[in-house]
Image (tube, helix red, strand yellow):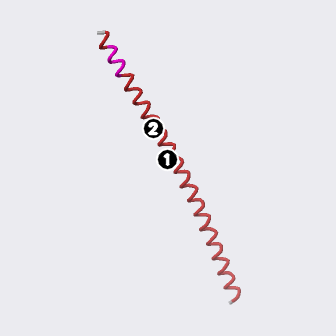
């Protein structure tokens, strides 16, 4: 009986170690995905900034053309 109990305990401990390793892997993947999400957010912000600047430039050019017409 003691031997079976010890075997079950060792099996349980091995399962726990496996699960802990899987949790660490998932945490790492989550962190990487969060970094990627932040990078994408930064790129979107920069893209909108460029779009805004180009639109402002185009409006200024149109205003100049209208003023010279």
Residue assigned mark 2: 25
State the residue in front, 14 or 33.
Answer: 14
| Numbered circle sitting on residue 42 | none
Q: Quadrant of the N terminus?
A: top left
Instruction: Give the image location of residue 26, x and y in percent.
Output: 45, 39
Report the side of 66 relative to 17 (left or right). Answer: right
Q: Is residue 4 left or right of residue 56?
A: left
Q: Please tell me whether residue 13 is drawn above or below residue 55 in the rendered image.
A: above
Crowd band around label 1 with a 10 angstrom C-alpha radius: few (<14), some (14–19), many (20+): few
Residue 10: within the magenta?
A: yes
User: Which numbered tag is attached to residue 33?
Assistant: 1
Residue occupying image coordinates x 33% and y 18%: 8
How far from the left and from the top, in percent, is residue 29? 47, 42
Above or below: residue 59 compared with residue 14: below
Q: Secondary structure at mark 2?
A: helix
Task: Name which residue lies at 55% across and 51% down.
Answer: 38
CA gap between label 1 and label 2 equals 12 Å
Q: Is residue 4 magenta?
A: no
Q: Main secondary structure of the magenta part?
A: helix
Q: Which residues are magenta?
A: 5-11
């Amino acid at each position: 009986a003691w031997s079976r109990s010890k075997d079950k305990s060792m099996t349980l401990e091995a399962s726990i170690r496996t699960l802990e390793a899987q949790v660490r892997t998932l945490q790492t993947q989550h962190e990487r995905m969060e970094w990627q999400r932040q990078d994408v957010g930064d790129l979107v912000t920069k893209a909108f900034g460029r779009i805004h600047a180009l639109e402002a430039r185009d409006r200024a050019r149109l205003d100049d053309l209208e003023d010279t017409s």
